[in-house]
Image (cartoon, coloured by chain):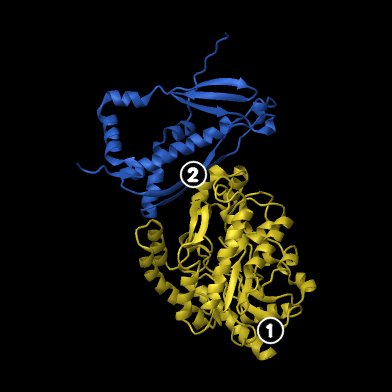
Amino acid sequence: MAEEKTLNGLRVDQITGILDSMRDDPEVLKAVTGPWKSRVVWQGGFQAKAYMRKHVVQMDEPDGLDASDSAASAHEQLLSAVGSCLTVGYVLNATKRGVKVHDLEIALEGNFDNILKWAGHSKSGNPGYPSIKAKCFVRADADEKTLRELWQAAVDGSPVTQTVARPTEIITEFEKV
Amino acid sequence: MAQQKLFPVTVVGSWVRPEWLVQALRRRQQDEISAEEFNRIADDAVLAAIKYQEDAGVDIVADGEMRRDNFYSFVVEKLSGMRLMKLSQLLDYMKDRAGFEEILRALDVPAFAIKSPIAIERVREREEGVALDEAKFLSAHTHRQTKMPIPGPYLLTRSSWFEGLSDKAYPTREELAKDVVQILRREVKALKQIGIDFIQLDEPSLSQVVYGDEAEQTFMCAALGSRSDPTTELEFAVRLVNETVEGIDGVKFGVHVCRGNWSRKEDVLLSGNYGPLLPWLARMNVDQLVLEMATPRAGEIDVFKEYRNVKELGLGVANPRTDTVENPQEIVDRVKAVLKYFDPEKIYLNPDCGFGTFAERCVNTPATAYRKLQAISAAADMLRREYA
């Protein structure tokens, strides 16, 4: 029996097969397209829990806001979500091209445009990040040109990054219970 | 040690690694080549480093630390019970991650690029001690006097003891320090035995104690574990250094302190004069203080006013991180300023630090490093003519 080839902790044939089936099998494509879901439940104070499939993520606010700082805040987790999605994309593209990645780290950073709007002191402007910096550090077995191409492919193909980078409609609803 | 001429020229330790050596080091770290195979490749690099130093007129030569990943992490190859861990692996155990994040951003480095030897079991020598193999090769390939830099006991203890990882083998870092001191004592006795002339204990983290921020865990050329208040730390360092060298005569001991040598960006390295450190350095029972003084970040020489001839001074007279080669006359003038506080026979000349503290982040080219050593030698000749 042929030995299963792994690269970057991924089974190469398996991942290639999955990517191909997304293209070839409408049912697979439908499954990975969504809907993706999260349910966020208030826990008191500024704390919340996000339930996603079988996973739970705690969220809180920094103690500078008189919160308990028991977990990262949502805006920090947004940065992390972008970074995590870019990480997945980089490793996926590297693996597809046969590049062994030894170390990969992404440092993200953002400044709010006008947080006074969140605080209720201002009615104009953007309370969110007008831009996010994401710097990729990588040590891998390929020349710099190849590694930069992988980074670009990760950025262009990242669902989370592209959601954040583009105008995305949030369809809100409300119900008093 | 042989009769010394005035103003001996020496180095702090590391030389610029050629790319082929870095490649071999990476292959060794990934276990793609054996230690023997790596050492055969590194032998050539050491010979080149020795040749550069000899040709430049260095009187007391080192092996360039060519076999080392950096000045202290290499001990994982030499000591059992140690594991080389990336800072990215230590993040899970860190108390002040936010503080560390600020440091990483200021340095603009990834956490995976910084590695530390962490004690995870009782630490013991594997075979030939810490640097004895390096020293034997050096001694066999030069007729000059020899210098071996080794990690100091405080650096090794502080960088190796990490709460959550080390406490099963060593409940406290003081317990680890006992073993570190004994290992280093055996090491320096063995180095002396084979005829090494000068043993330098590298203690760069001392500057972090007095100039660094308040973070318990931080980075100063090394990922550093917990620390107490500066006085407690410095007392600890003095005790460990003195326990390491106690009763061992017939070899010159130095302690090297600098403010960081991982970047050419001077603003990310620490600043401050030696004033806050000198009361403790003076109490270390070593012959020489090997100090960076060429960089303005090291402050003014007048801090030695109250410490005249306190020890020999390994005076840093060339900045290893610049492209500009120091003018010999400027070096002479700098030495003359120091002669206010030190007799001529107390002064050795060296660059501020190594040229390749980190194998993959060498701070200069071999050509410039060579010319800097030549400039120091030329200055030493000028001084000898004047003060002979």
Residue at 55% over, 76% down: B192
Residue at the outermost top position? A177
Give the residue pinned by disc 1. B345
Asked if marks 2 and 1 fall on the same chain, the answer is no
Residue B277 shows in the view: yes
What amino acid is found at the position of numbered circle 2 in the picture? Ile
The mark found on residue B54 in the picture is: none
Q: Height in image: B251 above or below B387? A: above
Considering the numbered disc 1 on the image, is that residue within a helix, a strand or a loop?
helix
The mark found on residue A106 in the picture is: 2
Report x, y in % for residue B212.
Answer: 67, 55
Q: Quadrant of the C terminus of chain B?
A: bottom right
Question: Do residues under tags 2 and 1 come within 8 Å of each other at their CB atoms?
Answer: no
Taking the image as shown, residue B385 lies to the left or right of residue A76, namely right
Residue B149 shows in the view: no
Q: Quadrant of the N terminus of chain B?
A: bottom right
Q: Height in image: A126 above or below B97? A: above
Residue at 48% over, 29% down: A167
Q: Nearer the viewer, residue A61 or B242?
A: B242
Label 1 chain ID: B
Q: Counting other residues with Cα less than 10 Å from the Cα at mark 2, is it few (<14), some (14-19), or many (20 or more)? A: some
Q: Nearer the viewer, residue A55 or A93?
A: A55
Within the image, what quadrant is residue A44 found in? top right
Residue at 49% over, 52% down: B85
Label 2 chain ID: A
Residue at 66% over, 57% down: B208
Q: Which chain is blue?
A: A
Q: Which chain is yellow?
A: B
Within the image, what quadrant is residue A160 found in? top left
Q: Height in image: B127 above or below B59? A: above
What amino acid is found at the position of numbered circle 1 in the picture? Glu
Report x, y in % for residue B139.
Answer: 48, 79
